[in-house]
Amino acid sequence: MRAPALRLGLVGLVLGLVLSGLALLGCAPKAVALGGSDMTAPARQLLLVVAEDWNYSEASLQRFERTSPDADWTPVGGPVPVSLGRNGLGWGRGLHGLALGAGPVKREGDGRAPAGVFALGLGFAREPADVGESRVPLLRVDKSLVCVDDDASPLYNQFVQTSGGPVTWTSAEDMDRADGQYKLGMFVRHNADPAVPGGGSCIFLHIWRSPGASTSGCTAMDEANLLALLRWLDAAKSPVLAQLPRTDYQRLRTALRLPE
């Protein structure tokens, strides 16, 4: 997701974003063979987001968990409304590879949230203590924390803690936003390992601007629902996000080992 250019006189100290050792499959727009059992086998927690169509900017999120790869997914709580990119969804780069069929492919600045299956990275919070006992690593959001969205930078699609020295980017997301949308959140591992220039960056789960308000490419929700999600997530259970339009969810559900 691209924000207005942020001119910084400080150099970045890259903060690790490694919660999953699963690498991305493929780096060019193409359909890939499905390997759902291998792709999602480690996951014991799932966030399932289903939109009515590719161009919908509103959807529903349901949490699930299971005890083993062969166990059925069990819903946790009820579905909650979420907002997507202003232009809907586009195939992202994730655990599924790239495109799993027809539909737009996500690009930097296209206003689409990524579709597919993605590992989750670091959580973040302005006041980590407010989250309580967390089972995912949390970054503290302050004025020095940015996420680089300059696709010519070697730090593209990475969190950076600024310090003194030269700058290697021309544009970055200021994480300490005045509107509070990044007061709480989670990094979605779209277009990582490695980040492909122009493939899209800085995709988060975060607080929405207002109910139903679209985003630049993230998945946003009510603050209370996001807080409940952060308190539930457990890095040891290899949580994943599956985000799809309804027809593709129905088409791919069995192959991707997703719940009904």
Image (spheres, rainbow, N blue to C red):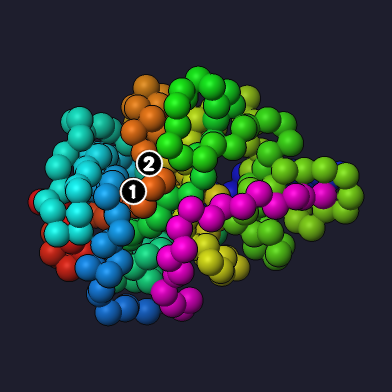
The residue singled out by tag 1 in the image is 237
Magenta stretch: includes residue 132: no
For residue 180, above or below residue 203: above
Q: Is mark 2 on a helix, strand or loop?
A: loop
Q: At x 52% / y 62%, what residue is drawn?
A: 192
Position of residue 150 in the picture relative to residue 239 (left or right): right
Q: At x 20% / y 59%, what residue is drawn?
A: 69
Asked where in the image residue 253 lies, by quadrant, the reply is: bottom left
User: What's under tag 1, amino acid-wise?
Assistant: Lys
The mark found on residue 95 in the picture is: none
Position of residue 148 in the picture relative to residue 82 (left or right): right
Q: How many residues crowd around disc 2 within 10 Å: few (fewer than 14), some, or many (20 or more)? A: some
How many numbered dots are placed on residues in this image? 2
For residue 209, above or below residue 87: above
Q: Is mark 1 on a helix, strand or loop?
A: helix
Q: Contact, CB < 8 Å: mark 2 with mark 1?
A: yes
**Percent of width and height locating residue 160:** 69, 48
What is the magenta segment's predominant secondary structure?
loop
User: What's under tag 2, amino acid-wise?
Assistant: Asp
Q: Give the range drawn in magenta.
A: 11-29
**Percent of width and height locating residue 133:** 45, 27
Judge whether residue 35 can be spotted in this image.
yes
* Nearest the eye: 217 or 259: 259
* Nearest the eye: 152 or 195: 195
* Nearest the eye: 54 or 31: 31
Q: At x 82% / y 49%, what residue is drawn?
A: 11
Q: At x 40% / y 55%, what residue is drawn?
A: 119
